[in-house]
Amino acid sequence: MKTYIINLEDAHARKESMEFQAKRSGLHYELVPAIDGRKIPANLLSILKKEHSYAVTPGEIGCSLSHLAVYKALTTSDDECALVLEDDVSLPEDISHFLNEIEHLIPKRHPVFIFIQGKPLQW
């Protein structure tokens, strides 16, 4: 299963950490440049913020756009399924075993999103 790691260009330590973890776990990965919400023009940010019922930060918008870019790329790739990670996760060393087990359970070519995070969502 291919792994896409979203990484901010200036987050060098996170990039190194993710590359170490991915290599240690034997993951086939690709680094994807994150969209830095701090660099989105203010006029565009105000338009994007109007679409939400709660206050979103530039970082949240950049993160969402980064994920959207990966999802769009997946629609034209040959990958039947993929793992999408942000650059601040800690991977268990045996993650590849887990991925091999679940890969056979995921329906192919049908969008399935499994969202895992370390803290409860705040809506």
Image (cartoon, rainbow, N blue to C red):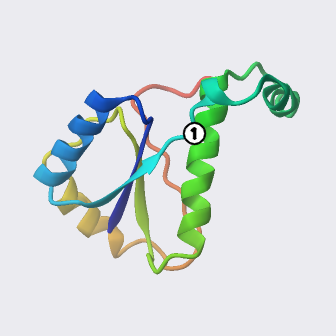
Q: Residues within 10 Å of mark 1 (few under 14, many from 20)?
A: many
Kindly identify the residue that appears in the image at 38 percent across and 72 percent down. 105
Q: Is 116 placed above or below 70 here?
A: above
Which image quadrant: the N terminus?
bottom left
- Indicate left or right for 90 with 113 as reference: left
User: Which x, y percent locates residue 46?
Assistant: 84, 25
- Indicate left or right for 61 with 43 as reference: left
Q: Which residue is mark 1?
A: 35
Q: Can see residue 94?
A: no
Residue 47 occupies which quadrant of the picture? top right
Q: Can see residue 44?
A: yes
User: Which x, y percent locates residue 73?
Assistant: 56, 65
Kindly identify the residue that appears in the image at 60 percent across and 54 percent down. 69
Kindly identify the residue that appears in the image at 62 percent across and 23 percent down. 38
Q: Is 17 placed above or below 94 here?
A: above
Kindly identify the residue that appears in the image at 88 percent across and 28 percent down. 50
